[in-house]
Image (cartoon, grey):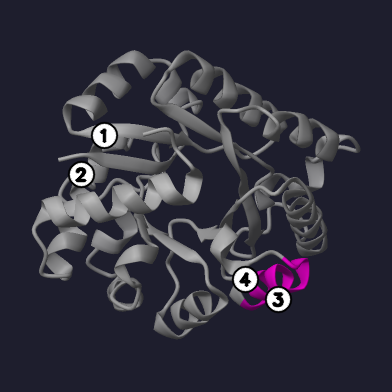
């Protein structure tokens, strides 16, 4: 069974210090490709370094909403350079997060819109983070002129009504271990609406360990197998069928060389 972890933070210290072992465990679990996410310019550089070293790793380059206020005057030119690298498959993760407001909402909105404009100019796809900011996120996406099929909502936690709006926009939707949590009925209801060809899976490692390994303090890409198995049961599919479909979807969305 072949799987792709479409969003994992391999440069995070909790994974990077034992990365060879982390990747070995994932490959043994059937993970054939990894998309290494990033949250700011230095993080994007570190993700690219890993992708250059590991044949089955691709990466993102972008500024997370938490880091928006510290983006720097030249961050867009730095991202443009990173996005020109062959192993950088999309801009991200970018978006809005009003849960913590580690950056002021106005800064978040400005940096998100600027990154979307860059992605559109460069013809790059975008991986979106949104938390408690859905209406503003979708409004900025619509204003950007990006096509819906060029957008991925990662680690989606939106209720069914918002998932319907995402699908109407034309975007792809990815689910992490959150969908397996006992208190995530709304997330599962939203996931049930996603057509097979618009569904991806991820870990968001080192965060969000899924059931039945939720007690793991450091999530790993190997655990994407649990997300796949859970969604297969929810959809009354053999795990192999869910794995095959999400792998095809990931290869198509990111243009992975598989």
At horizontal 57% and vertical 18% (from top left) the residue drawn is: 49
> Nearer the viewer's eye, disc 4 or disc 3?
3
Categorize mark 4 by other alpha carbons within 10 Å: few (<14), some (14-19), many (20+): some
> Badge 4 is on which residue?
133
Asked whether residue 143 is drawn in magenta, I would say yes
Image coordinates of residue 257 in percent, x first then y, are: 43, 33
Provide the residue span drawn in magenta. Answer: 135-145
Q: Secondary structure at mark 1?
A: strand
Residue 139 circle label: 3
Residue 192 visible in image: yes
Q: Which numbered disc flags the more N-terminal residue, 2 or 3?
A: 3
At horizontal 40% and vertical 25% (from top left) the residue drawn is: 15
Q: Secondary structure at mark 4?
A: loop
Q: Is residue 151 left or right of residue 236?
A: right
Residue 220 visible in image: no
Quarter of the figure with residue 5:
top left
> Badge 1 is on which residue?
31
> Nearer the viewer's eye, disc 1 or disc 2?
1
Front-most of 215 and 84? 84
Q: Which numbered disc flags the more N-terminal residue, 4 or 3?
A: 4
Categorize mark 1 by other alpha carbons within 10 Å: few (<14), some (14-19), many (20+): many
Q: Secondary structure at mark 2?
A: helix
> Nearer the viewer's eye, disc 2 or disc 4?
2
Relative vertical location of residue 149 with respect to residue 69 in this rendering, above or below: below
**Residues under numbered marks 1 and 2 in contact, where contact means CB atoms less than 8 Å apart:** yes
């Amino acid at each position: 069974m072949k799987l792709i972890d479409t969003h994992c933070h391999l440069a995070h210290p909790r994974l990077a210090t034992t990365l060879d072992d982390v990747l070995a465990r994932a490959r043994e679990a059937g993970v054939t490709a990894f998309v290494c996410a990033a949250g700011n310019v230095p993080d994007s550089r570190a993700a690219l370094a890993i992708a250059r070293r590991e044949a089955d790793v691709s990466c993102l380059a972008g500024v997370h909403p938490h880091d928006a206020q510290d983006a720097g005057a030249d961050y867009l030119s730095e991202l443009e350079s990173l996005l020109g690298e062959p192993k950088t498959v999309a801009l991200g993760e970018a978006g809005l997060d009003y849960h913590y407001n580690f950056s002021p909402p106005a800064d978040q909105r400005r940096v998100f819109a600027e990154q979307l404009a860059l992605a559109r100019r460069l013809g790059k796809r975008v991986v979106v983070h949104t938390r408690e900011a859905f209406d503003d996120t979708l409004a900025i996406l619509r204003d950007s002129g990006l096509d819906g099929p060029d957008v991925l909502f990662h680690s989606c936690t939106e209720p069914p009504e918002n998932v319907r709006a995402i699908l109407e926009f034309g975007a792809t939707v990815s689910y992490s271990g959150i969908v397996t949590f006992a208190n995530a009925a709304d997330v599962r209801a939203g996931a049930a609406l996603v057509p097979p060809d618009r569904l991806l899976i991820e870990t968001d490692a080192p965060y969000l360990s899924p059931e039945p390994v939720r007690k793991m303090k450091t999530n790993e890409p190997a655990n994407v197998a649990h997300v796949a198995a859970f969604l297969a049961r929810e959809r009354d599919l053999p795990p192999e069928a869910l794995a095959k479909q999400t792998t095809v979807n990931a290869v198509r969305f990111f243009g992975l060389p598989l």
